[in-house]
Amino acid sequence: MERDLALLIPEIIILLTVVFALVAEMLRLPRIALAIIIAGLLLATVQTLPLLDVNTTVFGGTFRIDTLSVWAKLILLPATVLSLLLARAELAGTDREGTVYVLVCLVSLASVLLAGVGDTMVLVLGILLSSLGSFALVAYPRDDFATEAAMKFFVFASVTTSVMIFGLSYWFGGTGSTLLSELSRLDSSPVVAVIGLFAVIIGLGYKASLVPFHFWAPDAYEGAPVSIAAYLSVVPKIGAILAFAQIVRDLPITMAWPLIIAVIAVLSMTYGYLAALVQNNIVRLLAYSSIAQAGYFLLGIVAVGTSPLALPSLIIFSAAYAAMNLGAFAVVMVVGRTLETFKGIGRNKPALGVAMVVFLLSLVGIPPLAGFVGKFLLFGAAIEAGFTWLVVVAILNSVLSLAVYLRIVVPMYQKQHDDSSVAMSTPLISLVWVIALLLTIAIGLGAQLLFGQLNEYLTGESLHCATSLSYLS
Amino acid sequence: MYPLVSITVFLPLLGALLVLSMRKAPTQVVHGIGITTSGLTLLGALQMWSRGVSETGFAQVEQIDWMPSIGAAYRVGVDGISLPLVLLSALLFFVTFIYSAKVRKQPHAFVALMLLLETASIGAFTALDGILFYVFFEVSLVSMYFMIAEWGHEDRQRAALMFFIYTFLGSLPLLLAILGLYLGSETYTFDMRAWISDPPLDGTAAMLALVAMLITFAVKTPVFPFHTWLPAAHVQAPAAGSVILAGVMLKFGTYGIIRFAYQMTPDAFRDAGLVILAFGVVAALYGAFAALAQSDLKRLVAYTSINHMGYIIVGVAIAALATEPAIRATALDGSVLQMVSHGLVTGALFMLVGMLQDRANTREMDQFGGLLKVVPILGWSFVLAAFASLGLPGLAHFPAEFQIFLATLQVEPIAIIVILGIVVTAGLYLRAIAQVFLGEVGEKWTTKTMPDLSVRELLALGPLLLLTIALGVAPAWVLDVIHKTTANWQF
């Protein structure tokens, strides 16, 4: 028990942070709440560092402390801090701004839980916690748009989550346990395994906004404050993707789950970029782009268990995605929500323009930026897993994505018709995009720093594969 | 020994950062930094030249671990194929900086982008690591996109977009091939030297990788039918961009065909040799005939590029098909020399067309006439470059094309029909010279509207023309370097 609690120190710190911040908010001290949360999240990040080499589970296998979940904390918690800075810049002075910070922190806790999921009940808990917080965040502006978006989001989430819980009951029936590590027992009853898998795909697919469970995302992002859209497109999404990885690690490879996921990857990438191609609202464009990027994540998921590159590539792409997507949203907060407002911005504000170009090219996957390294490793993992065709599709989609993102870049360097739209920047937003810019470049050039840490894990992972194989025999 | 290759590669990048950090500096200073940096880079390249190449493998190798877990490292070095191209790139950038010292529109961004492009170009030729090569390859695309989109002519946005998307689509198969070579290599490495000395793929996998690489480099070269981006990009690009695009960036294609396609999947390349040869012949003839149909001087030069690059493809294919090492070396020598000659001659031609356009604001040949009397230096320079381009003996293209045709006759005599291209280019250049520079002087063109070359333009053009003659009269000083590698060719 003491050991388990000691291993959960980062999560416990986040939970306590939420409580204290809530008290501060009740006293109407939003700045104090924000300070508490940022300090708490950074403390939790620091407390995660000693766990880097740990590979174990706590509370009877229901929660995993392994490289995946530890790195999820190291990526998601700083990303949450950056999102909070954006939220502060956008929402300062509004009624009940402190609740935003508290909810964001709670959703991050849920995302971190998802990334270490070892039990279907923790999965349900994580998704519900993350969803409930997100509804309120989207509805925060309390205008028609936001309310409608939150309502759609809520209905969609309720249905998908119910279906998921229903499907998960099959896995429980088949294995007699809620533990994911028992899933390999389903080898002899493929129908049960597939029903449960579809349930998980629906539940996590909604959370990660994968096609065809993405319908809520563009509306929710558009209705929500931009900073919240930025947050939702990064932290809960990465949490859900990593939960996916945790689950498929235990699925018997004999059932064709990689193929099912590959099909969803193709749908997400292609639909996401095609839909993004016709958007004029940049937030919606980035929403569809994040749907497509989620499809790229799945290239790593299909390779879990067959390629040693799979988990490192997922982690590196998570870090890259968090940096470049938050950066792009931060620039949108400065410039404005429509393509029209981007006209001439590259000439008027050269530094901001260069930063946006870097974020967008990184999203395309152009070297030597972070997105390239992440995608390159994902491609390598998928090829090694025998999914060369999927990589070819992903590569073709990269070309499509270039067209999508250049739709933003091209007007940036055109002549401005009028200078009525003056971009407003605050030091906080500038801080965020500068940090994101540095990270986008640094992750691209210094991926080895992450990789060196992950290397330890590669050997651990092969052991993991070996044990699951021995289960089969 | 200091890391000369790395210094040469990254010096322009340092210059670019310097320019960007001095946002208030006046235009002259900015161009001065550009010229100085590229001049120093040229000195670096010259010193690399004096250090030379080795008989086997790569010389002047510099290596730092980058991502050791996946076998990627920063590795650079040169051999007889890449060293002449490094020197060519450094020279072309230097003279282009002199030529474009007139640019007044956003000089900071222009110089910084050009310097970034220089790092990417020299980096691509010296990279000995699969990922590193790809990085430089793509960075060059991005910088060229902005170059065309910002400083190009009337329809630049569309041309830049087409160029970027087309060549980006073209470059992605290479990424697949690199991944395939990596996963096929025994030790999981991105070291290109290992891929060359022990080709990782065989059978169908090698053929698929070869096809992927050929698509990438065929788009870049460009080979018919993947060439459609080239005329659009060239016509809209600023003159400086055209010089670099034709002189340096097209070489990525042919260099890649030798370095990647030929050396890393040699058996598959040999099997596909006849097909590649056919593509080369068609490209050379198509380029010549398409150039014949142009009335726009810049489009004409652009299409003759397709023709000249076609000869290089022919040369490489012949080298692969040849059974005798001596013939193979001849074909490769010719091909690499052709890359250098094409860089010098086409660089000069695009510069001259740019100078004409600066003066006349048009490139339509029928708008000119009798210019030899108005601008004798410009005129005779164009005549010299045009004669070089059509392969006149004593000028740069002749020794290169001669060696290619010689090897072709010995290996696949039928492919010699490609020599028809020379006749066509001779015809079209003579027509162009007659229309633009001979005959009656148009009323519009007086020494006032059409001054002769300025000192700056002479300084930019002079080195290229002198080297065109030097390479034609005495090609040995370059051939010796190339031959050192091709004489011991293992494939």
Image (spheres, coloured by chain):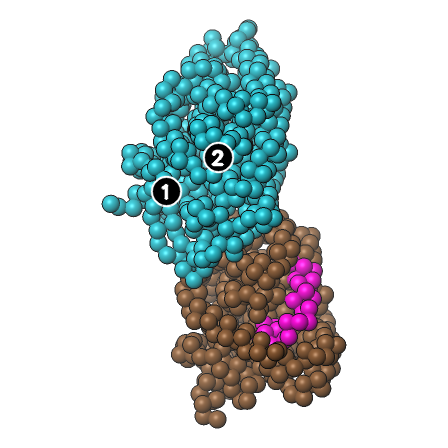
Chain drawn in brown: A
Residue B18 appears anywhere in the view: no
Check disc 2 and report the residue beneath it.
Answer: B251
Q: Residue furthest top?
A: B440
The image quarter containing residue A328 is bottom right
User: Which dot, 2 or 1, sits closer to the camera?
Assistant: 1
Q: Nearer the viewer, residue A222 or A306?
A: A306
- Residue type at mark 2? Lys
Residue that appears at 70% across and 60% down: A267
Q: Position of residue B452 (x, y in %)?
A: 43, 16
Q: Secondary structure at mark 1?
A: loop
Q: Residue at x 51, y 86 (%)?
A: A58
Which residue is identified by label 1? B58
Residue drawn 40% across the image and 79% down it: A50
Q: Which mark is residue A425?
A: none
Give the residue drawn at x 45%, y 90%: A3
Out of B111 and B211, give the one closest to the viewer: B211
State the extent of the magenta-drawn residues as a range. Answer: A244-269
Residue A23 in the image, given as x and y percentages of width and height: 51, 87
Which chain does the residue under circle 2 lie in? B
Quadrant of residue B96 within the rendered picture: top left
Give the left or right position of residue B391, taking residue A340 as reference: left
Q: Position of residue A393 (x, y in %)?
A: 65, 54
Q: Position of residue A73 (x, y in %)?
A: 49, 75
B271 or B224, which lies in front?
A: B271
> Is A272 displayed left or right of B315 in the figure?
right
Q: Are marks 2 and 1 on the same chain?
A: yes
